[in-house]
Image: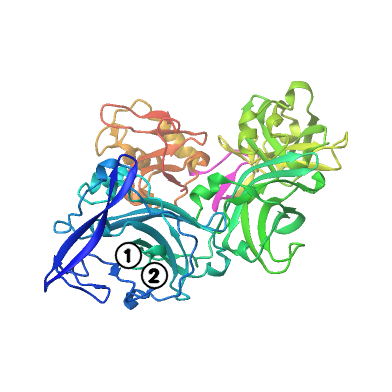
Amino acid sequence: MDTKKHYKMYKSNKNWFYAAITTVAVAVGLVAGGHVAQADTVSPDTIAQTTAVSSAATSTATSAASSQQQSAASQTSAAAPAWQPADANLNGQQAQSAADQKNYGNLDNFSIADGKLTVSGWNASNQDANYQDHYLIVYDQTQGKELGRQAVTNLQRNDVQKVYPGVYNAQYSGFNNTFDLDMTPYLNDSLQIISRYSNGTNGEAQYFDKWFGPINLGKEQKANSIDSVKQTANGLQVTGWMADDASATKPYAYLILLKDGKELTRSRVQLTDRADVAKVKGTIYNSLHSGFNTTLNVDQALLSGNLQILMRFTDDANGNGNYSDQYSKTYTSNTGYVDGYTLNNNTIHYTGWHAATNANGMNHQFIIVLDANNHELYRTELTGNQKNISRNDVANVYSWIANANQSGFSVNIPVQANMQHKEIRILHRYSSSADGNSQYVDFTSGNYSINSGWQGDYYYDPVTGQKATGQKVINGVTYQFDANGKLQSKQQNAVNRALSMHGVPYVWGGNTPAGFDCSGLVQWAYGLSARTTYQQQALGAHHYDVANAPLGALLFFGSDTTPGHVAISLGNGTYVHAPQPGQTVTVASQRWYAPSFYVVL
């Protein structure tokens, strides 16, 4: 039997003292040659990634457990004073080793936002009671060496104590340390942080380790955000941030303005601190120094097409050489929207907005009406309250376009004789010339019909505005018109027959003037052999532009193969049909009950 004397720290008032304690070592718990042999051996599963060793066995942080790559020469920083619990209630607290031998901890966060390595987390174990000095060690798994170590001033972690109330140092288990290391050589490496409790100088002698999971820096991470783009007299003012691991070897930062993928201008930027970025992108190298606020100088007349901001880190002072690029979203330079188009008798009320980056200096605005062949039909210059209407809603979305907040227009367009029965498009134009024919930028609407297409029994060609006569193929269907353009054939006859039955009651299965169901009325009006809606839908091709259904077309309601109802089109958005039991043959509108498709017989 041997005896062992060791020392326990305790606190009296503001002073710390050491008390000598003598223990007896029996065969199952020996101290010999500087090695510690514990009677209660803890299984590897219980203390995974932890190691307790003696300095007589090893003198470095990482050689005690080769299976965990713990071998390297120490690269140390000056040791801080040994940790002392801030809570006097911990004085004399004994480790509950018999109850809990586990080594708890978590690496909450790591950051290389300022080019250095900052780590935070916590580590607590009842076994730490024998090791009063706390150190953090950075170990490079890839290169197999220790990069540095620091003494820790433990931080209060009430959250940890709440979860582990019986663990010796849980309340004061926190750490937040920054290592003054240039991380450039290690950005492609896998690092591990070791939390060490020791009773020797600089973390040697006897110690107890916890190895946290690897920090994998080699992800070639990058991120960016364009916070704002604003058009100024000199070009585009751009604010935001850009961060990239590649900036470690490519220190020159550039913003490059692209037009349809080609460079317009570039500007070298001096990046500023963005603590908000570092907080959320701390794993990207130097993300703290990522902010920019610069103007990309360019002639505003060149601001057309699709614009884009390219953010570049390069090893060349002129912005070329080897580089790593990131791209912003695409910014349109010319956009607009039609808020309202109303044709009332012979007047079109037309409202909307048009914003363009290259419209500065274009003080004339025009409304121009074109036909389907791009022939001009009408033009008027906007004046007074017809133009430059305040549109803050547009400016909120298109903040990079200078005139977005005054981009609105509202005008009444008289329908000219040359517009009648045609399909038209309407242009809003900014121009620097009084006649609007030079230096201009346009926004073009979609297509609008001025009484074109089917108008009752007549059809007007949307391109020419001419009334169809004779035989004409429309949407793949052949029609016959008389000399005055009126639709002829069985369609008109069938419509007339069906309308003559107005007021006849609905009778299920009926197909005579005594009573009709829907398909019975169609069969009788056309003189068909096909009796059911299923048979009648198969009499021709299915067309889905139901608003354009011509006179006499069969309108079907429901699916293509099993429609549930059929009616006869009157060619103007209305139809005649036998609705349902209890009702009579009547005329209805597509506005109330819209068909799914139609068939032309």
Spatial CA distance of label 1 from label 2 is 9 Å
Rendered view: 497 above or below 134 = above
* Disc 1 crowd, CA 10 A, few/some/many (<14, 14-19, 20+): many
Between 64 and 386, the one nearer to me in the picture: 64
Asked if 525 appears above or below 215 in the picture, the reply is: above
Q: Say which residue label 2 marks.
A: 61
Q: Residue at x 79, y 32 (%)?
A: 365
* Magenta-highlighted residues: 473-490
Amino acid, disc 2: Ala
Hey, what amino acid is under mark 1? Answer: Asp
Residue closest to the far right: 434
The answer to whether the residues at label 1 and label 2 have Cβ atoms under 8 Å apart is yes
Are there few (<14), some (14-19), or many (20+) residues within 10 Å of tag 2? many
Whether residue 202 can be seen here: yes
Q: Nearer the viewer, residue 256 or 262?
A: 256
Residue under the point 70% across and 45% down: 333
Q: Position of residue 407 (x, y in %)?
A: 70, 32
Instruction: State which quadrant residue 590 falls in.
Output: top left
Q: Nearer the viewer, residue 387 or 192?
A: 192
Dot 1: what SS? strand
Q: Position of residue 541 (x, y in %)?
A: 45, 53
Would you name the residue on which mark 1 appears? 209
In the rendered structure, the answer to whether residue 221 lies left or right of residue 261 reads: left
**Marks 1 and 2, the one that precedes in the sequence:** 2
The correct choice, above or below, for 308 with respect to 344 in the image is below
Quadrant that contains the N terminus: bottom left
- Residue 100 location in percent, x, y? 17, 57
Instruction: Determine whether the residue tagged by mark 2 lies in a helix, strand or loop.
Output: loop
Residue 477 counted in the magenta span:
yes
Residue 111 in the image, given as x and y percentages of width and height: 49, 55
- Which quadrant holds residue 327? bottom right
> Which image quadrant is residue 87 in?
top left
